[in-house]
Image (spheres, helix red, strand yellow):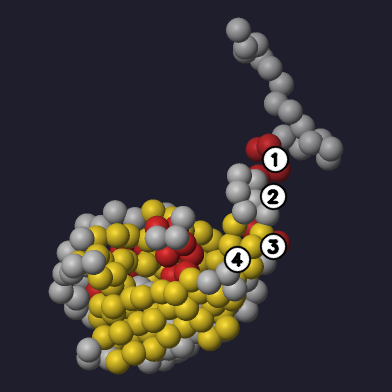
Amino acid sequence: MKQKDQKEQKDQHGRTETEFLSNYSLKKYPQPSVTADIIVFCETDQQVKILLIRRKNHPYLGKWALPGGFVRETESVQETAVRELEEETHLKGVQVEPVGLFSVPGRDPRGWVVSEAYVAKISHQPELQADDDAMDAAWFNLSFYDTLQALTLKFFSPIHGTFQAVLKKRLLPGILKERIEYTEEDNGELAFDHACMIACAIQKIYLF
């Protein structure tokens, strides 16, 4: 049984937690902005497709990218991914799960921005409607070629043409098993580090 009058612990400066928090300010420390990006795979007739949007604004104006955006203070990062997907493509009701956190310095030319990537896999190809920060939204046929040193991603659309991205691979030790780190050698027509995000999602779903 806990003592009713148990004293609150104090830190090395003699402060209780209440006293500490009353004088604490997050402004003392630099803070990154947080974004969410979502990779949507669609499998129809043994063909893997991926959803991409064409960016309407700087940076990477006109480049193809994953749907995504900045996290609001009132939502979780996963809620942001689902919201941004609907706002930019009008696609909703998909199940998503995390792929990983992307935080390499300089990944975003706007400043210190870290992003949590999510993946969804659906079995039908719904119509897309570009909106919000997207000037276009499209399904691309996706093929990938995996070797010991590199992963090549090829994107094809009968309307938007073909491009590819090439990623170098490095095997790193892990707690349960070895893991693969990707670095972009050529991101093709993709914005930010979205080629790395797509590669990690492919590794998680198709190359595990």
Give the SS element for disc 4: strand
- The answer to whether 35 appears left or right of 21 in the picture is left
The extreme top residue here reads 1
Q: Which residue is mark 2?
A: 23
CA–CA distance between discs 3 and 4?
29 Å
Structural crowding at the residue carrying mark 3, measured as other residues with C-alpha within 10 Å and reported as few (<14), some (14–19) or many (≥20): few
CA–CA distance between discs 2 and 3?
14 Å
Q: Are marks 1 and 2 in contact (CB under 8 Å)?
A: yes
Residue shown at 67% from the left, 66% from the top: 30
Dividing the picture into quadrants, the one containing residue 19 is top right
* Rendered view: 24 above or below 150: above
Q: Which residue is mark 3?
A: 29
Q: Which residue is mark 4?
A: 181
Give the SS element for disc 2: loop
Task: Say whether residue 113 is visible.
Answer: no
Amino acid on which the number 1 mark rests in the picture: Glu
The disc placed on residue 19 is 1
